[in-house]
Image (tube, rainbow, N blue to C red):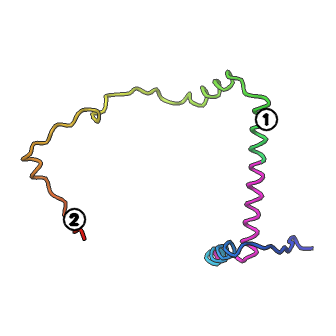
């Protein structure tokens, strides 16, 4: 007995067209494309269920604050201490540019568009 089962499905024409274009570009058979999609759907459903169980478990038995602090301390224990250093000059006001300097700046070489 084979490890495969044949199924027939009806899909919207737009979906069919996109799947055909994509599977041809990827060199996949129609069966392979559908099998890959179904396998991904099953994986996603399993992960969603695992996530739901994980959240339910923590809602039923929440972590104690001291446990969370201990884990956070352990996870960050190798970090170096940080000091802010010298302040940035970005907050300083910009000096005014004198007119003679401003007039010597190169102008944009993009031609102005005419209004019609």
The structure residue drawn at horizontal position 66% and vertical position 75%, both measured from the top left corner, is 23
Quadrant (top left, top right, bottom left, bottom right) of the C terminus: bottom left
Which quadrant of the figure has residue 50? top right
The crowding category of the residue bearing disc 2, from other C-alpha atoms within 10 Å (few below 14, some 14 to 19, many at least 20), is few
* First-in-chain label (1 vs 2): 1
Residue under label 2, please give it.
Answer: 110
Task: Residue 16 in the image: state x and y as whole percent.
Answer: 69, 75
Extreme residue in the left direction: 100
Task: Residue 18 in the image: state x and y as whole percent.
Answer: 64, 73
Secondary structure type for disc 2: loop
In the image, residue 66 sits, relative to residue 35, either above or below, namely above
Which of the two residues, 74 or 69, is positioned nearer the viewer here?
69
The crowding category of the residue bearing disc 1, from other C-alpha atoms within 10 Å (few below 14, some 14 to 19, many at least 20), is few
The structure residue drawn at horizontal position 60% and vertical position 26%, both measured from the top left corner, is 73
Residue under label 1, please give it.
Answer: 57
| Highlighted magenta segment, given as a residue range | 26-48
The structure residue drawn at horizontal position 19% and vertical position 64%, both measured from the top left corner, is 109
Quadrant (top left, top right, bottom left, bottom right) of the N terminus: bottom right
Residue 21 within the segment the image draws in magenta: no
């Amino acid at each position: 007995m084979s490890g495969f089962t044949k199924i027939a499905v009806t899909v919207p024409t737009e979906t069919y067209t996109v799947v055909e274009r994509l599977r041809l570009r990827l060199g996949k058979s129609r069966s392979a494309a559908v099998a890959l999609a179904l396998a991904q759907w099953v994986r996603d459903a399993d992960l969603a269920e695992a996530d739901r169980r994980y959240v339910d478990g923590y809602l039923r038995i929440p972590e104690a604050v001291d446990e969370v602090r201990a884990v956070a301390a352990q996870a960050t224990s190798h970090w170096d201490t940080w000091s802010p250093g010298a302040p940035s000059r970005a907050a300083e006001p910009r000096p005014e540019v004198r007119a003679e300097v401003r007039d010597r700046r190169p102008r944009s070489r993009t031609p102005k568009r005419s209004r019609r």
